[in-house]
Image (cartoon, rainbow, N blue to C red):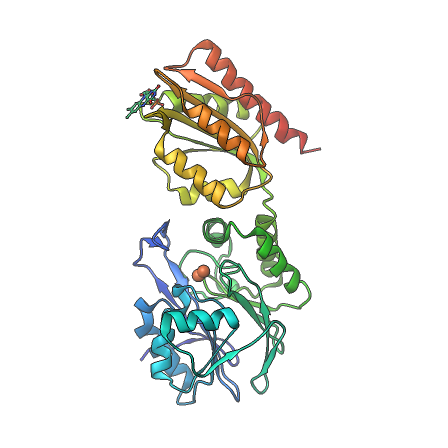
Amino acid sequence: MLKPIQIKKDLYYIGLNDRTKHLFENLWPLPKGVSYNSYLITDDKNVLFDTVDICYSDIFFQKLETALDGKQLDYVVINHMEPDHSGSLGLLRSKYPNVQIVGNKRTADMVEGFFGITDNVMVIEDGDQLSLGKHNLAFYLTPMVHWPETMITYETTEKIIFSGDAFGTFGTLDGGITDSQLHPERYYDEMIRYYSNVVGKFGSPVQKALEKLSTIDIKYICSTHGPVWTQPEQINKVISIYDKLSRYEGDEGVVIAYGSMYGNTEQMAETIAYELAQQGIKEVIIHSVSKRSHSYIIRDIFKYKGLIVGSPTYNNKLFPDVEYLLSKVEGRDMKNRYFGYFGSYTWSGAAVKRLTEFADSTKFEIIGSPVEMKQSMSLDTYDSCIALGKAMADRLILDRK
Ligand SMILES: Cc1cc2nc3c(=O)[nH]c(=O)nc-3n(C[C@H](O)[C@H](O)[C@H](O)COP(=O)(O)O)c2cc1C
Ligand SMILES: [Fe+2]
Ligand SMILES: [Fe+2]
């Protein structure tokens, strides 16, 4: 028998940890695993919030059964249909045939498409309420955080939000479930990585969702991944992380992401970084695109205002992993960045040309002059790299005032 964890009276954690998968969405590394969080409120009517990845449905159903303790399951609220949360929905309906599925119009369309379920689906609209007895739910549609059907459910009596992916993090819950049972600092960087990797493109829908949430008093945030946020300072902290990320606001610092096969282009990166440090910029993060997963590079690009990209010419194009990184940056509609770039070639240059096209296609502020190197570092190239580093530092320092 597996027991759920009681978070507070009438509120149970039915989630679990995934320490098996290497890649979330088959894309993003999970060195610290991930949790799939599902919650149950018991009342006159019993309601489940989201389910878990189907790989873990056995554990999930055992915990749910124990929590229900013979009572019936009346509702399952689907805040998000991505299969890491809705994966066990079909099985849930076969185990609990009378459970009513609660979601919006778009949820209903996906429930039909993925599970062939059309009966006993309650379609709610923005602002609708549902009474459970002592507890009462209000639904807030928050489309495109990060799918069209996403919504947040607010339990008005205890002031709990079931926020779906919003405020979620990578990383398993090792013992503690709530922020007061663990060191929350452990999760901040993994929250930024989750946001930038998964939600990153949808800054403006996230801003709209935050506006809706700003009208309500929140005592608990129950998201679908990572800790349950209960401490006022943590609640403020995670909301401010989301606010900052969705406004694409970076801190002072520079990510230098480069490709290099034999180390020549790499020396340009080192030279630029050296000058940034000389000018007093302390947050300088150099990523070799071949060595570091894009997941972490994207995270750091969301964290810092400065971005400098470098690449050798490779078969008359950019080095492939650099091209891939640019597509990820483009795909997230990154804004408010200071952008510099450099490249190299041996017989005919294409890298800087392509980086110029990229720079022109963004709304980034271009910093300094691009540096193009033939073969290896000359004194001229060295000076140009120093100038690029200095220009970036000057721009960042200007913002201090
Ligand atoms: C597979 C491959 C393709 C290349 N394609 C080009 C090219 O299209 N144009 C060019 O000028 N140099 C090309 N080069 C030469 C590189 O510019 C040279 O290897 C240089 O040292 C790469 O920079 P790195 O030392 O930072 O890796 C190519 C090299 C390799 C290994
Ligand atoms: Fe999701
Ligand atoms: Fe998720």
Could you tell me which residue is drawn at 59 percent across and 40 percent down? Answer: 251
Residue 296 in the image, given as x and y percentages of width and height: 43, 43
Residue furthest to the top in view is 379
In the shown orientation, is residue 232 left or right of residue 299? right
> Would you place residue 375 above or below residue 108 in this image?
above
> Would you place residue 298 above or below residue 18 in this image?
above
Residue 287 in the image, given as x and y percentages of width and height: 42, 34
Residue 109 in the image, given as x and y percentages of width and height: 45, 71
User: Residue 138 falls in which quadrant of the image?
Assistant: bottom right
Residue 351 in the image, given as x and y percentages of width and height: 42, 25
Q: Is residue 174 visible?
A: no
User: 142 or 307, which lies in front?
Assistant: 142
Quadrant containing the N terminus in the rendered view = bottom left
Could you tell me which residue is drawn at 31 percent across and 53 percent down? Answer: 22
User: Residue 171 falls in which quadrant of the image?
Assistant: bottom left
Could you tell me which residue is drawn at 42 percent across and 72 percent down? Answer: 111
Q: Within the displayed image, which quadrant is ligand 2 positioned in? A: bottom left
In the shown orientation, is residue 51 left or right of residue 42? left
User: 201 or 298, which lies in front?
Assistant: 201
Quadrant containing the C terminus in the rendered view = top right
Q: How many marks?
A: 0
> Would you place residue 396 above or below residue 247 in this image?
above
> Would you place residue 260 above or below residue 164 in this image?
above
Q: Is residue 155 visible?
A: yes
Could you tell me which residue is drawn at 40 percent across and 27 percent down? Answer: 311
